[in-house]
Amino acid sequence: MRVPSRSPGHQPGVTSPVPARQPTARATARVPRVEPDLDAYRDAVTELLVEVGALADAASTPARQVLLDQRLREPAIAAVLDATPQGFIGARETLLLEMARYQPNPRSSARDLTALVRIYLLSRIDVMWWRDAPTFLTDEQVHTHPDLVDLEWLRRRRLLGFRYRQQPATVFGRAAHAVRRRLLPEATPRTAGVKFTRARREIVALLNDIAGEFDRATPVGAPPLWVTSLVRSAEHQHRLRRLGYAAMVPSGHCLGWAADVEMAWLQRFGVRDTLAEILLARQAAGELNVIDEGQAWHLCPAPAARAGLRSAYEAELGV
């Protein structure tokens, strides 16, 4: 299954003000929403990152803030930030706060300040696309929400084309995982595992489709697609932040519309670049938002692909 779409999907924009007089039928026609140019946005973010990198030291903090004040207001960037739930001002202030609080941490995918800015700005595409989706606030909501399906149930029936490891929930489980890691250090990716083995049906269909394309493009014996993170509750997202991870808020993970896939581990098998090409081609076609976070890459499907993914799930999995 492939769901081609060159549209960046349903995105919020600016509508005309409500007239003071009683509107006519013609006047009440909805004005089409303006869709930000995501290619221009990504290009502008890339240019911004070069400048941020040149001002990454502590002594350059005032100059860096002036730079951000100026560059974030450029039309290509401002259009996306303004279309997020926080709006332009909220997104800008959140980024400045993230930068002020940033401390290097080996757990974090943001290895430096430039990476933090890149991950934050590119992840705003997710929350712009899915701004109308409800946030999973608590762990309990993730475990019980009817929009999410049980991956363990699907895995036992061999309906998943990708692999994942469930995060151990007990001291015994964590000890067993540590023993396996010592005995077979390269057998699986170095990841804590997925805390919530649940996902939206559309995400399952997307990952199965990518896994199938990846399998067809790699030699016999190559590892399968490995997923390191799926849906998260906002409660868990804040736990990760306290531990030092670059867990952005708001996040596509907390909306159920994001997943992370392992990349670094694939390098030892010589197939990392193959998966990277597949993902970037889908981004270029408007199907995905892709963020290089180092060890793992972050994926979020465009809203335009939702119906096709849901149909594929129902047709292929039948559940």
Image (spheres, grey):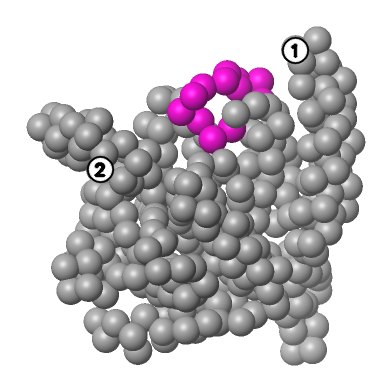
Q: Tell me if residue 53 can be seen.
A: yes
Check the image and name the residue furthest to the top: 59
Q: Is residue 272 left or right of residue 93?
A: left
Q: Position of residue 218 (x, y in %)?
A: 49, 68
Check the image and name the residue furthest to the left: 172
Image quarter for residue 150? bottom left
Residue at left offset 83%, top offset 39%:
48
**What residue span does the magenta drawing correspond to?**
99-110
Rendered view: 255 above or below 156: above
Q: Amino acid at mark 2?
A: Gln
Q: Secondary structure at mark 2?
A: loop
Image quarter for residue 113? top right
Quadrant containing the C terminus in the rendered view: bottom left
> Which of pointers 1 and 2 lies earlier in the amino acid sequence?
1
Circle 1 residue: 58
Q: Is residue 151 magenta?
A: no
Q: Tell me if residue 10 can be seen.
A: no
Rendered view: 182 above or below 201: above
Q: Position of residue 244 (x, y in %)?
A: 46, 25
Helix, strand or loop: magenta stretch: loop
Measured in 3D between alpha carbons, the distance from the residue under mark 1 to the one under mark 2, in whole angstroms, is: 37 Å
Residue at left offset 83%, top offset 59%:
40
- Image disc number at residue 167: 2
**Mark 1, residues whose alpha carbon is within 10 Å: few (<14), some, or many (≥20)?**
few
The residue mark sitting in front, 1 or 2, is 2
Q: Position of residue 228 (x, y in %)?
A: 39, 49
Residue at left offset 62%, top offset 70%:
282
Q: Secondary structure at mark 1?
A: helix
Q: Position of residue 120 (x, y in %)?
A: 64, 41
